[in-house]
Structures are given as C-alpha cells and as structure tokens.
Amino acid sequence: MTNLKKEIAKQITKATKLKQEEIENYIETPKDIKNGDYAFPCFYLAKELKKAPTQIAEELKQQIEFNSDIIEKIEVIGGYLNFFINKELLTKEVINNILCEKQYINSNIGKEKNIIIDYSGPNIAKPFHIGHLRTTLIGNSLYKVYKYLGYNTTGINHLGDYGTQFGKMIEAYKMWGNEYNLEEEPINKMMDMYVRINALCKEDEKVLANCREDFKLLENGDKYCVDLWNKFKDLSMIEFNRIYDILDIKFDSYNGEAFYADKVQEVVDILERKGKLIESEGAKIVDLEYAGISTPCIIQKTDGSSIYAARDLAAILYRARTYDFDKALYVVAYEQNLHFKQIFEVAKYIVDEKYYKGLKHVSYGMVNLPTGKMSTRLGNVVKIEDLINETISKAKDIITQKNPDLENKEEIAKKVGLGAIIFNTLSTANNKDQIFDWDQALNFQGETGPYIQYTYVRTKSILEKVGYIPKAEEINIQKLSDEYSQNIIKLIYYFEDILVQVTKKDEPSILARYLINLSKNFSIFYNENKIITQEEELQNARIGLTYAVGKILKIGASLLGMQMPDKM
Ligand code: ARG
C-alpha cells in the first residue's frame, strides 16, 4: 500500500529541521481511531525549540501545506499533531491492494538485513515443559513476522546438549543401562536415570569421580561416550520433533551447545590476549564490575572445562562470521537476564561493534497453571505435549457440543486447540507472567485464538453464501463510508505498521491484540450492516470488505503460528 506515513513525514520535514527518517520514527498511530490516522508527538521538539508541545503543534499546523486529496484535516490534540487521511483515498488503497492479490507489504525495511533468532533451545534428556512454551512460540512468531517483512531471517535452536551432566548420564548408562528400555518414553527414562545417579553421586565420591572422567572422555571424543551421547540426543529429538511437528515449527539450524565446545578456546585466547581474563579460585573469569555488573562472567572452570556462558560467547563469534547479523535476538526467560547482560558485555571484546550492538535479549515472564484440577491432572512438571493433547481434546468436546454434524472434527479440534494455546501465549506482553487456563483460552467469545478463528470462519461462510468475490473495480467505495466500514478499513490499512511495530519491540502481543481488535470491529460491522442485501453495489462493497478482513485475519494469525479452520 502507498505509504501515507512517509507522505506526512515529508510535510513535517519541510516545516522543521529534523530528518524525514527521524520524523517517520516518531509518528504513531493514535490509540483511539477517532483521533486520526497518524499522530506526530510534538514533545520531541520541545527541548530544541524551547516551547511547549501544544504551541509547537499549533504552529506546525499553520505551516504544513497539505493536499486535501491526501490529508483531510489536521488537528491539535494535547501535544500531538493528528492527521486524518482522506477517507476515500484510504478506502481505495485498502480495496485495491487486498482485492488485487498484490503484495501488501511495500516497505523495504527488511531488505538486505540479516536477523538471527535463537529460540526454543530445550535441554537434551530433560522434559520439554511449559517453561519452554513462550520461547518456542514467541521465537516462531518473530521469525515469521521478520521474514514476511523481507528480512533475511535465520532461526536457531540452541539445544542444551552439552555439559557435565552428560558425564553423569554416561556413567548411569554404564551401570544400569540394561534396566531401562530407553526406546519407550525416552525422556522419562533418562530423567529417572539422571535422578538416580545424582543421588548416588552425593553418597559416593568415587561415582562422582567416574562421572567426571566420563565427561572428559566425551570431550576428548572417546567413541563409546560420543555414541552414547548421540543416542541420548537422538532419542530426545524424537520427542522434541513430535512437538515441533504438531506446532509446524522448523529451524534453520540445530547447532546446540555441543557444536561450540571446540570453539571456546578461541574465545579464551582472545580474552587472554586482551588481558581481560583473571584467575579467581582456579577459574578464569572476566570482571564486569566497571559496567555495573557485580557478578563476574565465568569463562572456564577450575578443571578447565567450558561452561554455558563460554559456549554462548563462542556462538556469538561464530554467528557474526557465519550470518553477518544486523540483529541477533535471544528469546529466553527472564531468569537468564544476568547471563545475557554478562555475555553481551564480554562480547564487546570478541566481536566488532556492529555485532555486539545488534545483540538483544528478548526476555519473557513465567507461565503458570491455575492451581487445582488442571495442574494435578498434568502433574508437577507440565510437558508441552500433554498440555497440547489435553487442550485439543477439550476443543473437540466444545466443537462437538456446538456443532455435532461438523465433518473433520479431529482436524478442526487440532487447529482450535493449538490456536487457543498459541494465542494465549502470545497475547500477553513478553515481560508479564501469564496463566494458562483452559476455560479462558478456549472461550469462543473471549479475547482468544478461537474467537479470531470463529470470526474468520464467519467471513468464509458469508462468502460461501453469496458465492462470489467482487473485483476491486466492481466496488463503489462511496458505499463504504459508514463508520463501521471505515473503522475496519483503517485497521486493515495499519496492518503493515503493526508488523513493523512487532519487530521494533520484538513483541508479538502487538499483533495478537490487533487481530482481536479487527475481529471485534468486524463483529460490529456485521451486526450493524446488512451484508447480503438487494442493493447490488452495497452488497459488493461489503462482500469485498468481508473478504479483506478474512484475508488479513488469516495472514495475521499465520504470523502468530496459528492455522485457520474453514468451518468450526
Ligand atoms: N537451553 C537453555 C535453557 O533451557 C536455553 C538456551 C537459550 N539460548 C542461548 N543461546 N543461551 O534454559
């Protein structure tokens, strides 16, 4: 669509000394549609001009020359300069673009920019539990949005597949391997072995020493240990992939921690050369006190083995070289805030400015289950797989109740159940904790995934009833000048801007809330306006708009990782 924001920025630029790009950055979409389509907050200029924002806004309003074919009017509200785009122009833009099957994204912000996203990263031989749900889904959605905007995007699953715990696993297998059939329920079995060996290590120093020895052997490439480690990894991946398959999530790279084990030495060498490594109680550390981080970053343990942080630093170096990234996102829980603060600080010694400035921790809060029946039913550590299966079965009950004759109930229940989980996970702002509650997440009337799916299905059934989709040139845009249609048109027009905001804040909840807003406005439109009428021009216009809403809902939902059923 034509970028009218650019047009407005151009006009403001003429009246101020700021650069157009800068102004474009400041321009917002007002929260309340009634306040216009774009707003320029004048307090950004207040300091420089030494004037009150309202006064600046008033003066700018006088100075800006506008073409009424583009801008209908400008109003000053508070310190904001609010722009109202010409209604007909906006309507034409939306109708022409959506009905012509053109690409609606016209900005080239993503062009030639490399983004890498590190997300999911479950730990081998440990359950894939709901603590990993948000990283997996937020990461997947960001991946899709960046890609849609034309960024060159790489998704990385930084598997937790290395560390001294594998020495323990190997020792446990040596001792009791024949007691456990790892092929059935591999992760549960491996967990049992791990718990058992840990208990034994506490009692028996000799066993602990053997575990350490096994880890050394693994590090040095001993065939027996490496094969075993591979077996643990392969078995775990079978379980993880079941979940990725059902969620339809793929990664471009599965290079986990183990991949970086032999790349840590270079990091140590660089830090050593720059005089940043200090010996402390036998370990090698980088002191970060100067940067206001009171806990030093440990790079190497007393016994010389590498640790999580060092492997992450090796990953930064490797990724800078391999992907030449402009931005590297780490979608990881807030528990690791300190870890990322530390390694991003140390990264300054290891990679060029372009790279360390591009590092960003996309931190998120916890997922909780409401206490009571639900948590007990799923157990203490809630596996993602169990949550998914339970939610799909609940969805099936609801669908069957609502619509007993529906065909393909299994398929639809899967989409609705997953839609409920995905939307519930993504509609909370990253930094907030969240609760997963079946009744809430599956409520067709609430602010939920199923509500968006239900709205989409409604658009579909209207189109099916009339049996045609009008062409853009068959639509008389005058017929869409009522308030309800206009609200929808504005929202559709904002779609691209919403996606840009998602990437600016790395916050899929912006898109989730937008889709709710669009769905609600469609419901109002639907209740207030007769779509199927005797008057052909009116019907064409409203059918066209209905189609447009369905299309944006479907694309938007797919960018969250949700699929739409055709019926429900
Ligand atoms: N395996 C880690 C965990 O489960 C997450 C890995 C995050 N990515 C990273 N590069 N550190 O907590």
Image (cartoon, helix red, strand yellow):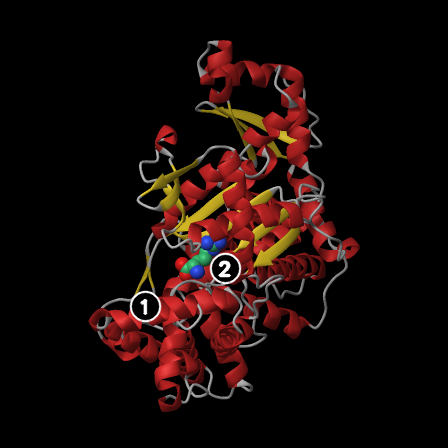
Marks 1/2: CA distance?
Answer: 23 Å
Q: Position of residue 372 (x, y in %)?
A: 21, 72
**Amino acid tagged 1:** Ala
**Amino acid tagged 2:** Glu
Disc 2 target residue: 257
Q: Would you say 366 lies left or right of 268 here?
A: left
Query: In this picture, is 507 found above or below 539?
Result: above
Image quarter in which the N terminus is found: top right
In this view, the residue farthest toward the right is: 473
Disc 1 target residue: 209
Determine which quarter of the picture holds residue 558: bottom right
Residue occupying the point 64% across, 40% down: 87
Whether ligand 1 has any atom under 8 Å from the Cβ at mark 2 is answered as yes
The image shows a total of numbered marks equal to 2
CA neighbours of label 2 inside 10 A, class few (<14), some (14 to 19), many (20+)? many
Q: Position of residue 509 (x, y in %)?
A: 46, 52
